[in-house]
Image (cartoon, rainbow, N blue to C red):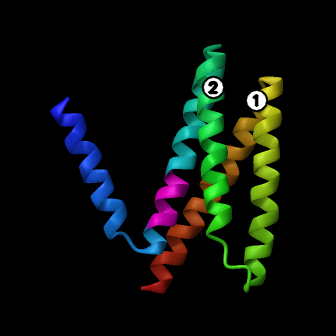
Amino acid sequence: MVLNHAAVQYQQQKIQTSSPGELTLMLYNGLVKFLKLALNEQEQGNIQATNTYLIRSQDIIKELHCTLNMDYEVAQDMEIMYEYMNRRLIEANLKKDKEIIEEIIGYAVEFRDTWVQVMKLAK
């Protein structure tokens, strides 16, 4: 129990001291992680766990949506993609469709990898 508390404190400290770019990267990493967990649970037939991980993924997409600066045209494009991804995850959850989850993992990985490159260029 002490170890878990220390891990939570470390994570909170990391979040509080991270730049906005690093926080966005954490969101993308979390999205990829939860989507992969959802896919794994779906393949094992664990409907409840799949639902839980898909809901967490949707929550992260909503948070990413909130971070958009709509003054930039790219943000408007990202908004459309986030809305699409969210709708597809709802559909994946309703239909228990692993192919949809795989599709969204592809987008999430691509966005994360692109964000890593953006952060490198910004330094």
Residue depicted at 36% across the width and 69% down the height: 18
Residue in view at x 18 percent, y 35 percent: 3
Answer with left or right where residue 44 lies relative to residue 119: right
User: Which residue in the structure is indicated by mark 1?
Assistant: 93
User: Mark 2 — residue?
Assistant: 50
Amino acid under label 2? Thr
Q: Identify the element where label 1 is drawn.
A: helix
Residue 35: quadrant of the picture: top right
Density class for disc 2 (Cα within 10 Å; few <14, some 14-19, many ≥20) is many
- Residue 116 position in % (x across, y down): 50, 68
Q: State the image coordinates of residue 31 (x, y, percent, origin top left).
A: 57, 48
Q: Position of residue 58 (x, y in %)?
A: 67, 45
Disc 1 crowd, CA 10 A, few/some/many (<14, 14-19, 20+)? many
Mark found first going from the N terminus, 1 or 2: 2
The magenta stretch is: 23-29
Confirm or deny contact between disc 1 and disc 2 (CB under 8 A): yes
